[in-house]
Amino acid sequence: MAATAEAATAGGAAPFHPTDPDFVVAELPGGSRARDGFARQLELSRSDPQLAGELAAALLEQARISAQPQLYGRAESVLAPWIARPTVPAPLLILQANILQQRHEFAAAIELLDRAIAQEPRSGQAHLMRANVRIVTGDYERARPDCAWLLGSGEQWTGSVCIAQVLGSTGQLARARTLLEKLMAGDAVGPGDSVGPSAEVLAWALSVRADLAQRAGALPEAQDLLTRAVALAPASDYTRLALADVLIARNRLAEAVDVLDTARPSVGVLLRRAIAQSRTHAGYTPESLAALEERLSVSAQRGERTHLREETRLALEFPRADAAAGGHAALALARDNFNVQRETEDIRLFARAAAITRDPAALATLEAWLQRSHYEDIVVDQLLRSGRSS
């Protein structure tokens, strides 16, 4: 669930670059200096909220780009003494909300963002993060006011991308696509120019535009947009995974494997590697599949449920020998995931599992939600029709 983190970075949470040469962001293998440096910074941060914010932000940025989830725990240990206080500075509330949404504790994240905005009503980062958490959970109408606030405050790019996501999920997909096309066509300068969007904002806009294009069935356009986004933000796991998904959907498997060639593969990267490799070599069991299953097993042992999306797709792509049992297991995972988050992939996975099992209750649940929200996706529509066909 990286979308909200990507949006927060795009919306003004600039990557932290420490100026102190002794500042330690993450522990290096076998590095006692790293451990000692972190302990020193941690101790100092207990009496300095600005340092606590800087250290936690550095850890979160490193976690985002390095696929090291343990760094979220380190960031939380920095913030914990401050979060426990009756009054917490708004920047620290926003950082803690970032950690909570990474753990899919969305309601708790919203609560902290509400508190941050009450303290600092003009915090664009808090408004954008709150809007995107609500978009990710399918609460589109409650995201709309924060998007409108961003536009009203002069944040043309973040506000436009924010409202495009709401429009695109509430029956106005074509209008949302047109909005972003006009926004980007009107950008006469390159990323980083003083009057143009940053590279992070432009990459985010491209990825949202690509998502809308996919849902309209325009895969070549989505591929082009995501290729540009990855070039602008090569460290973004979220954008890289989205591009790999489009390439897999277009059966461009070798290209997908190339896109997924990262030094520190996330769970999402391992899953897509396994899919692309298994489709390239029929009957072949990819090495990445064993690594993925081991990673998911460790998460399960810890009681974590942050990889429901990947578990669902794994069950659908690599079904058990007992197809019926495997299908219903995949449906249970897809339903649980849909109840937590509702991005494009989550909705498609639920539709796919419901169609495979032809489960009347699941099909009815999804159809009722689509009718209420007016969400549009050509793939979801096709899956529902196949699930209902005799």
Image (spheres, rainbow, N blue to C red):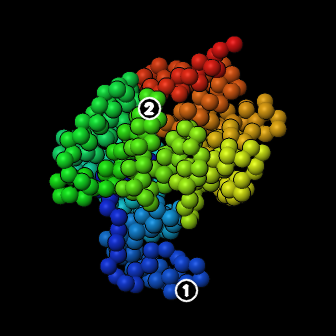
Quadrant where the C terminus is found in the figure? top right
Whether residue 100 sits left or right of residue 315 in the image: it is left
Looking at marks 2 and 1 on the same chain, the residue that comes earlier in the sequence is marked by 1
Q: Nearer the viewer, residue 342 or 245?
A: 245
Vertically, is 377 above or below 43?
Answer: above
Neighbor class of circle 2 (other Cα within 10 Å; few <14, some 14-19, many 20+) is some
Q: Where is residue 189 in the image (x, y as percent from the top left)?
A: 20, 51
Dot 2 falls on a residue whose secondary structure is loop
Q: Nearer the viewer, residue 50 or 131?
A: 131
Whether residue 326 sits left or right of residue 197 in the image: it is right
Which of the 4 image quadrants contains residue 168? top left
Q: Position of residue 130 (x, y in %)?
A: 36, 45
Vertically, is 22 above or below 167?
Answer: below
Do we see residue 251 in this rendering?
Answer: yes
The residue sitting at 36% across, 56% down in the picture is: 232
Q: Mark 1 points at which residue?
A: 32
Vertically, is 204 above or below 87?
Answer: above
Q: Name the residue under label 2.
A: 218
The residue sitting at 56% across, 38% down in the picture is: 249
Q: Are marks 2 and 1 in contact (CB under 8 Å)?
A: no
Q: Nearer the viewer, residue 348 or 378?
A: 378
Q: Disc number at residue 135?
A: none
Q: Position of residue 353 (x, y in %)?
A: 65, 31
Q: Where is residue 323 in the image (x, y as percent from the top left)?
A: 79, 33
Do we see residue 150 in this rendering?
Answer: no
Q: Most extreme residue toward the top, as rendered?
A: 390
As measured in the structure, the alpha-carbon distance from the residue carrying label 2 to the one carrying label 1 is 51 Å
Q: Which of 334 and 274 is in front in this view?
A: 274
The residue sitting at 33% across, 55% down in the picture is: 200
